Image (cartoon, helix red, strand yellow):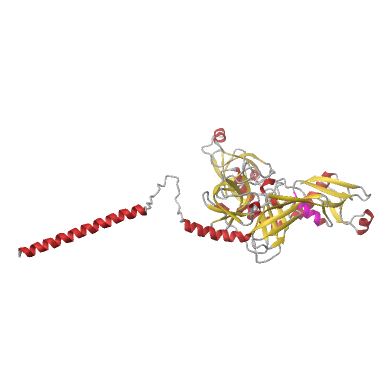
Amino acid sequence: MNERRNNMKQALKTIVLAVAVSTLTLFLYDQIKDQDEPKVVLKEVPQNIGYQTAYLPTSKQLMMDFNSSAENALHAVVHIQTEFTRKSSVYDDFFSLEDFFFNGGNRVYKASGSGVIISSDGYIVTNNHVVQQADKITVILNDKRSYEAKTIGLDASTDLALLKVEDKELPYLTFGNSDSVKVGEWVLAVGNPFNLTSTVTAGIVSAKARNINILPGNSAIESFIQTDAAVNPGNSGGALVNIEGKLIGINAAIASRTGYYQGYSFAIPSGIVKKVVKDLKEFGQVQRAVIGISIAEINAKVAEAYKLKNLKGVLVEGVVDGLPAEKAGIKAGDIILEIDNIEINSPSELLERVGMHRPGDAIEVKYLQKDNEKTSTVKLTDMKGNTKLRSAHEEAVLELGANLKPVDEKTKSLLGIENGVQVTEIKRGIIANAGIKDDFIITKIDRKPVNQPDDIYKLLSTKKGGVLIEGIYPNGIKAYYGIGL
């Protein structure tokens, strides 16, 4: 009996020891495992601290996303090659100037840049400075197909241009929403730097609504998306796409002391691009809307001078009589806080918001006036206070201030000319300001022959700055006139 009891005790001890050893083994295994694969501990961030947490995908997932968006973009981003007789004056160094040759005594430059196909029927958006003075534009696709492109319209104030090639079922990119782009989000820049076709670089959005004072003219709209994706000469007009492969910007400039990439590049937001493209398609020119105010950024010094409680909004320095803001009751010294429920904290943000509209559109403006918060509906106009939308042709007719007619064959024969358009009934406008007299026959504009009045309207509607007009009077005296647009 005692022996049996002792056997049972011994068996119990063995079981207890086995359990203890097993427990210890499991504990040690967990410790070793934890050392090999550290635990991720998620902590809730207190709501009163201004941090935002986000899900970070693994490197494998990121690579898959990059592959997909890059693949889409590569087929829709094109290589643009141009020939022109006058070098561009708009930050020349950013598109790739390759070579020049002589043609008929003229030095002809060759250059290259990038563009983005935005519809299957061949519409292509690029930078104005890539094509603005081009005599010939060649578009080469990623699959090496080549086309000669025609210019639909140019806009120097946003540095955008719309081209067209004749084909169907072309690969294209769809527009993304640049308003929803966040600082820190991954983006890809796709283009043709240094003639290295179909190049993709990655980076993040570094800032938004950046004004770098690079575009000429008082009507320039600069509200760039800043990124650290590598961009170099030849990338001009290329695509900035998000991880979904949607077009959120057109690459336009770099911040550099050398002319090459030094860390930051700038793209025109897709919101502006869409509006400009739509205008150029429909009218051949941009329908520029204005609110009629001069504005300034609010900093500590301005806030102190105006006794402001915070640094939010944009200061209205002045209001133009007869234009939309004045009619809506906005006054100098007011602080604009929002446009269409979107916060405005810099002049570039305000210009971007207004720049997305046409004359005749209405916007809701929230502003402070003597510490009283107000909201007004502002109906936008053009610089002259008009809401009528005009085509490039109509605008050119008005600006010329003269009637035009083709030259008859008898006159051509007598003067020994092959082409020309005659000026009649000169009124107020560009023709009169240049000193041109009645019956003058325009034969060339910037060395391009003209045969019909439409040739002149189309040429002038796509030009900015100085333009050379060549021609002859009925008495045989040749004349040259320079006009400014």
Q: Is residue 459 magenta?
A: yes
Residue 142 visible within the image: yes
Residue placed at 33% from the left, 55% from the top? 33
Is residue 425 rendered to the left or right of residue 90? right
In magenta, the rendered stretch is 454-463
Residues 438 and 372: in front is 438
Residues 81 and 246: in front is 81
Is residue 391 rendered to the left or right of residue 256? right
Residues 95 and 321: in front is 95
Residue 388 visible within the image: no
- Point out the image quarter for the N terminus: bottom left
Is residue 290 rendered to the left or right of residue 471? left
**Residue 237 placement (x, y as % from top left):** 65, 53
Residues 191 and 249: in front is 191
User: Which residue is at the far bottom?
Assistant: 169
Residue 22 falls in image quadrant: bottom left
Count of picture labels: 0
Residue 36 falls in image quadrant: bottom left
**Residue 409 placement (x, y as % from top left):** 91, 59
**Residue 215 placement (x, y as % from top left):** 67, 45
**Residue 467 placement (x, y as % from top left):** 79, 47
Magenta stretch prevailing secondary structure: helix
Q: Is residue 36 magenta?
A: no
Image height check: is 161 above or below 318?
below
